[in-house]
Amino acid sequence: MSGLSAGSFPEAAVRERARVGAAAAFPALADYGRALFGAAPAVPSGDELDAARLVPPVFVPERLEKLIDLAREPLHGDVDLGAEVGGFTSPLPLYLSAFGSTQVASADLGRAASAQAGALGVPMVIGENVVPVNGYGRLDGAGGRSLLGRISAYADAVPDGSGGVVVQQSTEDADAEVWNLVYSDPSARPLLDSGRLGFELKVGQGAKPGLGGLTVVDSADAGRLSAQFAVEDVFGAGSGRALRSASPGTFTEEILRQQIRLMRNNFPRARVWVKLPPGRDVALAAAVAWEAGADAVTVDGAEGGSGWAPTSFLSGVGLPLAECLRRIAGPAGCLLVSGRVWEGARAAKCLAAGARATGLGRAALIAVDEDPEAGLTRLVECLALELRLLISALGKYRADALTPDDLWSPTGWAVPARTPAGTVTR
Amino acid sequence: MDTTSAADAATPLPAGPREHLSSPTTRAVLRLQHTVLDATREHLGGGGFTELLPPIIGPVTDPGARGAKQVDVDYYGHRYKLMTSAILYKQASLTAFDRIFCIAPNVRLEPLETSNTSRHLAEFHQIDVEIAGASRDDAMAVAEGLVAHVLRRVVERSAGELEVLGRDPDAFADLLSGEPFERRTHTAAVADLHGLGHDQNPDAEIDWAGEAVLSAKSSRPFFLTDYPKGSRGFYDKENPARAGRLLNFDLLAPEGYGELCSGSEREHEYGTIIARMRETGENPAKYGWYLKMVREGIPGSAGFGIGLERLTRYIAGLESVWQASAYPKVPGVVSP
């Protein structure tokens, strides 16, 4: 453990899962046969996804189909969690989100998370700030902590035919030509040749929609950085630290459309992902991205993000993930979402509301911090068991079979039926 | 020469520079290339063009190279780039002369998949031309005239080299017939390729395999025009009468040799260039010197760049473009 903390997140529960795995999906074994259980009183929550419930039906025609198929009563173990996630094949409707731009996320945890995500065969996004902070790893001797170090940690562990690595780039680090570097680097070639390399255009992020990256830097570095970033002394002259702000980048419908087309033109063998902030026009932006040919749109709810942000933004800016899902209802392409996902129920609610897969961000970081060897693996094992239990309870046996009918919300979840798979238009 | 990482070029790479430089083939090719350069200078000089020597490094360079990585240079603590093309300087140079050309060295760390296209080099040269006040049609006429002149001189002066290379001068008879080069739009080319069963993205460049297919069907060079906006750099002008289409062109060689040249009418309005930079994912902040010149006014223009090694390859009938370079840098291959 590194002393990493996540006060606004169910950290203790995530750490328990990283230690014990699937057993953490249930109450303590010692209480079995001794204690009485039952639902706790509903706790008022500002988070509509938390407030929503998954609602199994009495009549289950899809279970009958499965029964006929199997010639026996189906069980939760018969649920196929396999998913097509942004052009990649994944055994689970999950991916590893990019970690934020803080020092926390850029330490060796990134490499540990990469190796475990690779072994699990789930896609992984590598954040924009890895190159500026830890280097490429080609001529700079940065080794395993670098971008290429993380790619090789993943590629060494990933099974054939599964997963993929998605490298993020934003307006500011377009200068560093991260995509061009990866696309032309020999170490990424096995992923490229097997169709398992993607690039994510970062339009914005959950924790601070409307802002670019914010980091705290040593005052000594301020001069060097001021050519590229705004550097302000907001912490007092004696602190020795300064605030470094990057631009959020300017987007219009046409700018987003053409940037995506240029990505497809310049990197024809890479998948194209687009990461949107929880903006009020998130549905329009997602539609533009899919129409321009994006293989996936990832949406970070306002509750997402591991990075450093002004408290005013954390508490009062951006649409909650539930509202993003409601606005994008019936997505015309692959929708991936993240924001406080760490266990099966929230993940299943997102799938029911139209997402193809959910991202693990903070939960993955905490899990590898708890155990760099297997923490993420155990967290995912537990989450996968919960997903199987929940999806089979809903009378379904595929992760992509969930629909808004499977959700009940105290405020009503008026979501039109999602577009059936296979009708994505370009 | 270390050929372990990407040695799948069509023709096996030479064991070393001595073997390459002393081979009769290389000698004939380089003498032919000398004739090409002589004829280029003769033709453009006679047409009122001034030859400039382009810069090799600068704070910023052409971002329009499909998927290639730029090379960073530490310039007294500032990150500079080796030129991927001379485009920004070509536009700026029109504040000195109305008609300029350069024989410009370019370096692009191309994706490794280009090592077996037979027509990519990480280091190459372009015959770069820019004309103030010109339209796309003007630039296409200059490109067509230049290629025809070069071929005429090669046939007149380099018969010996063509013979050593086994290249029949009759291959150029159609080109030298005086008939204008055919013109076809990108949309028509995409439709052709779809008709042939080739899966071409209609919003993108014609891919390398598609170019080879189109090129193989022709017996003299031809133009492709009106590429979609998302396929090129910010400096190719958008057609005001046809949104989303650029006033640009490629010149393709026949016989499967593929692209020789790219050109366009240029954007030169400050606000449009900034918006186009964003559409191409660029951060305008790093283009400081260029944008200052644009803001203060540069002439409208049109121009093009002909790949010298590609032109040489076509004329000499070579299997691979690296054979047209004395010190070839095939993408990914460590070589002198």
Image (cartoon, coloured by chain):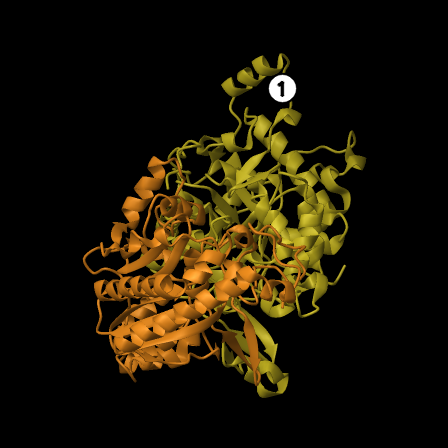
Seen in the picture, residue A152 relative to A176 is either above or below; the reply is above
Q: Which chain: orange?
A: B
Question: Given the image, on which type of amino acid does mark 1 rest?
Answer: Pro
The quadrant where residue A258 appears: bottom left
Does residue A63 appear to the left or right of B169 in the view shown?
Answer: right
- Quadrant of image for the C terminus of chain B: bottom right
Instruction: Tell me the residue that label 1 is attached to.
Output: A74
Percent across and percent down for residue B60 are 45, 75
Front residue (pair A413, A142) = A142
Front residue (pair B254, B298) = B254
* Residue A113 visible in the snapshot: no
- Quadrant of image for the N terminus of chain B: bottom right
Chain containing the residue with disc 1: A
Q: Residue furthest right?
A: A30
The quadrant where residue B286 appears: bottom left
Q: Residue at coordinates 74% horizontally, 37% vertically from top-left?
A: A23
* Residue B241 visible in the snapshot: yes
Front residue (pair B202, A67) = B202
Does residue A338 appear to the left or right of B264 in the view shown?
Answer: right
The picture's colour for chain A is yellow
Q: How many numbered discs?
A: 1
Q: Residue at coordinates 61% horizontally, 56% vertically from top-left?
A: B13
Percent across and percent down for residue B76 are 57, 85
Does residue A79 appear to the left or right of B196 in the view shown?
Answer: right
Percent across and percent down for residue B274 are 33, 70
